[in-house]
């Protein structure tokens, strides 16, 4: 007896075979994004001659000439560590302070709350260069020019509105019940915040931190104007190698490697934590 | 374990009074229900007792200690929230253990206590799961376990059963009542379900628009409601309320509705001075079970009506009768009314039991005269 065959597929389900082009698009996007970067990285490992040769080569003998020049002769690691300190510190301060601001905005009803929210938001609308000169003068007066503390202060202030704005929404999504329940169970407000709200907020805080860190790490305009020798960070330091008539491409490539590598590592590292945080909850006792 | 004293408690949100002049004394170990329609201020009252909301005025004492403005953690109350308030980042075990960890109990003691309470609430199998992997019934059990696990002076529960299906709710009613009486902790339970309150409570507080209408035992609430609102809020199907006028007919005091006269009990009329109300409008109340029906009118069953709808509920039948513009619902056992017609539009005769007629003031809603039947049984209330 012939068994009738049933088509078990829902008519709305996309056919699996048809999905090959999704991969094609993905591969294309990856190529477009990745190949130029790969090329820059490769250039960084070339010697001066092959980097500036008219016929680019895919295969060459790697050389650390450019890195040697940057690190030993130019001492770029000083700028590198300046960048690390400035971006870590400003991220820490802006996220910590911003977290409490956001919490207050999300949880408490006080006079002028909406005005504060709006003001925080509008802070982001202003192009930073508009205040370059006033800030320069202020820094000069306060003796903050070319100091790491000055940059940390400035970046913290710059990133705060963004942090507050991002986290306010996330805090609103966490029911107040959680803290209330913990307080009824005998916790202080701060303990409830630390043990209940913060773990639930961790993925959002991590995401915000990544963002803020990248912005601080890459900040160029203020760093150029407000630092000269002592506190110079990576972006203005590297700028020096990309101007002028005789650009040494391998040095520029090596500089790009130095400025991007930590970012890539950092994002990869935290992304894992972010994903695991989202999927299984953060604190497990 | 402690008693609760609440004195002229008031809470204002802006110009709006959510809770107004609430006075309650709950005895040690008592199971008290806060009953009222949605938005009447039940949750607000409970939150003030827990310390999550500060009263605008008034006084709250737990176990003789004035806690009116104390922070929640100094009150030692256990609470189940309307939406459970379980932490989604902790396992069920973590959730139940939380109040114990706050108190810095030893690990062994925590495990032992959590497992004991999990056995009581029958949630041992789900201890390692996260709240989002539980059914509503299990969630509710976890929330209750969390409240039971610590030795709180007072338990507060805000509509813990509102997410459960009817069958589960029925089971939980008996179980919860049993647990409350076993642990003997003073408990205030918020609900808008009159059946829950009637079946489980030692005493019920009926609230409406932030005001406390009556605070009494379920039986007294049912038999001697303080206002028309209380009378109609408890009991299912609800009490029939008819617009009437007190009149003198053939020398007797009766209640005249638009279409028929309702005879009243002479003793009761005398006791409640109903004669003083002659020619005044009243609201007449009678519960469906106190209206008897038969096929043909006789000396007693003088109210002639038409069957508007028939609703069998199993052991009992509901007959909705129409008499002119007046509708009344009656309830009688299926066996007694087996022979009656069930067709809409057929004629029936009804009798209002004079022992169970209530009179309410149309202006204030207050009860003018409690039913004679409740006077008789008054002694054992
Ligand atoms: N924080 C607040 N601000 C303003 N008004 C509020 C606030 N909390 C409650 N109310 C108001 O107070 C009234 C009582 O609220 P409450 O939550 O106590 O009602 P409820 O009796 O618990 O109702 P339900 O059965 O729906 O839970 C409502 O009208 C509500 O809108
Ligand atoms: Mg409520």
Image: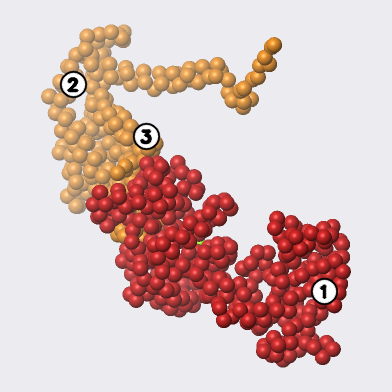
Chain colours: A orange, B red
Q: State which chain disc 3 sits on.
A: A
Q: Quadrant of residue B229?
A: bottom right
How many circles with numbers are drawn on the protein?
3
Residue corresponding to mark 2: A67
Q: Which mark, by number, is residue A275?
A: 3
The reply, left or right, for residue B6 in relation to residue A55 is right
Viewer-proximal residue among B278 and B316 = B316
First in sequence: mark 2 vs mark 3: 2
Q: Are marks 1 and 3 on the same chain?
A: no
User: Which quadrant of the figure contains the C terminus of chain B?
Assistant: bottom right
Q: Report crowding for label 1: few under 14, some 14 to 19, many 20 or more residues within 10 A (C-alpha).
A: some
Element assignment for label 2:
helix
Q: Residue at x 21, y 36 (%)?
A: A84
Q: Quadrant of residue B304?
A: bottom right
Residue B203: image x %, image y %? 51, 71
The reply, left or right, for residue B344 in relation to residue B373 is right
Visible in this render: residue A165?
Answer: no
Q: State which chain disc 1 sits on.
A: B
Element assignment for label 3:
helix
Mark 2 and mark 3: span between their CA atoms? 34 Å
Q: Residue at x 34, y 33 (%)?
A: A271
User: Which quadrant of the figure contains the N terminus of chain B?
Assistant: bottom left
Residue B363: image x %, image y %? 67, 81
Residue B101: image x %, image y %? 28, 53
Q: Residue at x 55, y 16 (%)?
A: A17
Residue corresponding to mark 1: B301
Viewer-proximal residue among B192 and B268 = B268
Mark 1 and mark 3: span between their CA atoms? 76 Å
């Amino acid at each position: 007896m012939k068994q009738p065959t049933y088509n078990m597929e829902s008519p709305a389900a996309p056919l699996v075979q048809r999905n090959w082009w999704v991969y094609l698009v993905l591969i294309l996007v990856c190529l477009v994004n990745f190949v130029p970067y790969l090329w820059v990285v490769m250039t960084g490992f070339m010697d001066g001659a092959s980097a500036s040769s008219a016929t680019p080569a895919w295969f060459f003998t790697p050389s650390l000439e450019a890195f040697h020049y940057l690190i030993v002769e130019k001492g770029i690691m000083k700028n590198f560590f300046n960048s690390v300190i400035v971006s870590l510190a400003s991220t820490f301060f802006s996220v910590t302070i911003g977290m409490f601001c956001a919490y207050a905005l999300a949880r408490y009803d006080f006079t002028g709350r909406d005005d504060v929210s709006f003001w925080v938001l509008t802070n982001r609308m202003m192009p930073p260069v508009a205040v370059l000169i006033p800030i320069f003068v202020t820094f000069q007066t306060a003796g903050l020019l070319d100091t790491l503390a000055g940059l940390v202060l400035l970046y913290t202030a710059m990133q705060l509105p963004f942090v507050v704005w991002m986290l306010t929404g996330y805090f609103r999504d966490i029911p107040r019940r959680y803290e209330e329940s913990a307080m009824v169970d005998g916790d202080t407000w701060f303990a409830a915040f630390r043990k209940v709200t913060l773990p639930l907020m961790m993925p959002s805080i991590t995401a915000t931190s990544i963002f803020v860190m990248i912005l601080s790490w890459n900040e160029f305009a203020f760093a150029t104007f407000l630092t000269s020798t002592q506190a110079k960070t990576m972006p203005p330091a590297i700028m020096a190698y990309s101007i002028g008539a005789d650009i040494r491409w391998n040095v520029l490539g090596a500089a790009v490697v130095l400025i991007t590598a930590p970012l890539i590592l950092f994002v990869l590292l935290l992304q894992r934590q972010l994903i695991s945080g989202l999927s299984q909850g953060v604190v497990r006792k | 374990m402690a008693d609760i004293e609440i004195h002229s408690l008031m809470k204002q949100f802006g110009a709006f009074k959510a809770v107004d002049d609430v006075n309650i004394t709950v005895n040690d170990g008592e199971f008290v229900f806060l009953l009222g329609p949605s938005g009447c201020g039940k949750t607000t009252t409970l939150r003030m007792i827990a310390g999550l909301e500060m009263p605008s005025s008034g006084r709250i004492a737990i176990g003789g200690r004035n806690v009116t403005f104390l922070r929640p953690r100094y009150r030692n109350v256990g609470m189940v929230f309307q939406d459970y308030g379980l932490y989604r980042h902790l396992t069920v075990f973590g959730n139940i253990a939380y109040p114990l960890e706050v108190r810095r109990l030893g690990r062994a003691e925590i495990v032992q206590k959590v497992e004991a309470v999990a056995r009581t609430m029958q949630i041992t199998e789900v201890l390692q799961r996260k709240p989002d992997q539980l059914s509503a019934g299990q969630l509710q059990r976890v929330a209750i376990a969390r409240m039971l696990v610590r030795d709180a002076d007072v338990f507060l529960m805000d509509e813990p059963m509102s997410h459960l299906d009817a069958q589960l709710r029925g089971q939980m009613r008996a179980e919860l009542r049993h647990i409350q009486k076993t642990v003997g902790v003073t408990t205030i339970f918020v609900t808008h379900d009159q059946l829950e309150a009637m079946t489980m409570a030692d005493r019920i507080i009926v609230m409406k628009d932030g005001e406390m209408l009556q605070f009494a035992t379920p039986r007294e609430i049912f038999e001697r409601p303080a206002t028309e609102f209380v009378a109609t809020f408890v009991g299912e199907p609800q009490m029939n309320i008819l617009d009437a006028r007190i009149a003198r007919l053939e020398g007797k005091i009766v209640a005249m509705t638009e279409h028929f006269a309702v005879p009243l009990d002479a003793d009761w009329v005398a006791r409640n001075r109903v004669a003083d109300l002659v020619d005044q409008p009243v609201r007449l109340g009678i519960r469906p079970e106190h209206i008897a029906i038969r096929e043909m009118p006789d000396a007693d069953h003088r109210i002639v009506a038409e069957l508007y709808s028939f609703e069998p509920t199993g052991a009992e039948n509901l007959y909705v009768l129409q008499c002119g513009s007046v509708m009344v619902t009656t309830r009688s056992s299926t066996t007694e009314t087996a022979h009656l017609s069930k067709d809409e539009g057929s004629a029936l005769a009804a009798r209002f039991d004079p022992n169970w007629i209530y009179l309410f003031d149309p202006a204030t809603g207050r009860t003018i005269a409690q039913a004679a039947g409740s006077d008789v049984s008054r002694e054992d209330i």
